[in-house]
Image (spheres, grey):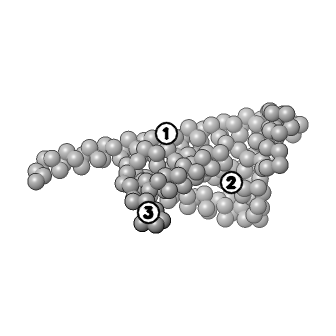
Amino acid sequence: MTTEPDATAAAAAAEAVRRRRVSVLLVVALLAYLIDLGSKLLVVARLEGHQAIEVIGEFATFQVIRNPGAAFGMGQAMTVVFTAIAAAVIVVIWRIARKLYSLPWAIALGLLLGGALGNLTDRLFRSPGVFRGHVVDFISVQHFAVFNLADCAIVCGGILVVLLSFKGSNPDGTTAPVSTKGE
């Protein structure tokens, strides 16, 4: 039997955990965002209009590309749609954060949020104009794509979300039973 002060203390402790998890989410998002923003400012100032710089021979280079589309340059005529999708992702993450008690989920969502904000900033503030801005990509891997650090954060956050989901982990800290075939 739980007394009222015990229930109040438990609720306060749970709220403190949630606040710490949301703080982790925001710190991870801020770090991902600032690293992405700083790298883009640096490469635009130093590399745009110049020859590619070899990082690992010809396999990996730094070269500035303005990308109006999504991954791999797809959907170049849909810049406004990608802007709306990024904004929607930010809203969804914020809504999930209200019930966030899991540290791994806080990190994953922070990476997704920071990356989405990084690319959304380009879409809003870079030429050719608001909602139509081209994303600055600069990491080029031979026979692959040109991408940026926001993209890296999004991919890492997405992989972590998939792994957590396969483990049965939920953002609220609960674990769903993982079903196995043959049971």
- Describe the element under mark 3 as helix, strand or loop: loop
Q: State the residue lying farthest toward the right.
A: 51
Q: Is residue 34 above or below residue 68?
A: above
Labels 2 & 1 near each other (Cβ < 8 A)? no
The residue mark sitting in front, 2 or 1, is 1
Percent position (x, y) of residue 89?
55, 58
Q: Amino acid at mark 2?
A: Arg
Judge from the rendering whether residue 151 lies leftward or rightward of residue 74; answer left or right: left
The residue mark sitting in front, 2 or 3, is 3
Q: Which residue is the site of mark 1? A: 27
- Describe the element under mark 2 as helix, strand or loop: helix
Percent position (x, y) of residue 49?
87, 40
Quarter in which the N terminus is drawn:
bottom left
Labels 2 & 3 near each other (Cβ < 8 A)? no
162 or 182: which is nearer to us?
Answer: 182
Whichever of labels 2 and 1 marks the residue nearer the N terminus, that label is 1
Which residue is drawn at the image coordinates 78% and 50% (left, top)?
145
72 or 92: which is nearer to us?
Answer: 72
CA neighbours of label 3 inside 10 A, class few (<14), some (14 to 19), many (20+): few
Tell me, yes or no, if residue 102 can be seen here: yes
Percent position (x, y) of residue 77?
77, 65
Q: State the residue lying farthest toward the bottom.
A: 182
Q: Amino acid at mark 3?
A: Ser
Q: Which residue is the site of mark 2? A: 123
Q: How many marks?
A: 3
Which residue is drawn at the image coordinates 63% and 52% (left, top)?
120
140 or 15: which is nearer to us?
Answer: 140
Q: Which residue is the site of mark 3? A: 179
Whichever of labels 1 and 3 marks the residue nearer the N terminus, that label is 1
Percent position (x, y) of residue 81?
67, 65
